[in-house]
Amino acid sequence: SDNVSASITTTDTSAGKIKAYTCQFCHGSNGVAANPAYPNINGQNEQYLYQSMKAYQNGERTNTMGKMMKQQLSSLQNQDLADIAAYYSMMD
Amino acid sequence: SDNVSASITTTDTSAGKIKAYTCQFCHGSNGVAANPAYPNINGQNEQYLYQSMKAYQNGERTNTMGKMMKQQLSSLQNQDLADIAAYYSMMD
């Protein structure tokens, strides 16, 4: 899959599935959110997914949902984010 | 379509299409972004689309893309945002 960061050269969708375990409770196991306040992320652009997660981590999305997502992503490294982005971007 | 705000009681997808004219240059006429740095928005949850546009307007997305989107949305009223959200959410 496309590189999403200068520091990431490969992505692993199988690892992404494992790392995305907690994502499913809001975004669905198939990337379709049960709650309409949350985005569907199945088939979303990989680069956008990665950059959005980085924006949350960097505190660049400052509303309530942004703060929640920052907390959710706090323990993930760039490679984890890249793998998760690859995993969801490949879903139909 | 579902109400997306306490202040919005009806949405008009035909009006949304007209109001979304400038959106297409980044998000595509079919909601599929040509640039992978931008999100696809076809079929996205209407409520999420509305709330995201409000977050941009409110300056709650602070990175470069967030600032660009705040400018893009600066002239739109809540009803406009609701109509645009309804329009893109209905796309396949």
Image (tube, coloured by chain):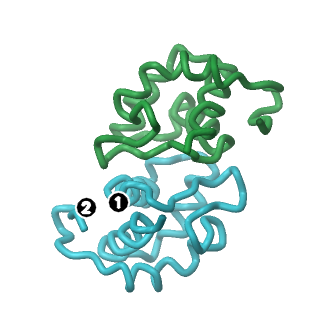
Chain colours: A cyan, B green
Mark closer to the chain start, 1 or 2: 2
What type is the residue that disc 2 sits on? Val
> Which quadrant would residue B13 be assigned to in this image?
top right
Q: Residue at x 29, y 43 (%)?
A: B35
Q: x, y (%) of residue A27?
A: 60, 65
A51 sits to left or right of A38 = left
Q: How many marks?
A: 2
Residue located at (60% from left, 60% from top): A68
Q: Residues within 10 Å of mark 1 (few under 14, many from 20)?
A: many
Instruction: Verify CB contact (< 8 Å) between mark 1 and mark 2.
Output: yes
Residue A4 numbered mark, or none: 2
Q: Amino acid at mark 1?
A: Glu
Query: Which secondary structure lies at badge 1?
Result: helix
Query: Looking at the image, which residue is at 69% across and 20% down?
Result: B79
Residue A57, x across and y down, in percent: 43, 61
Query: Against B27, is A62 above or below?
Result: below
> In the image, B79: left or right of B55?
right
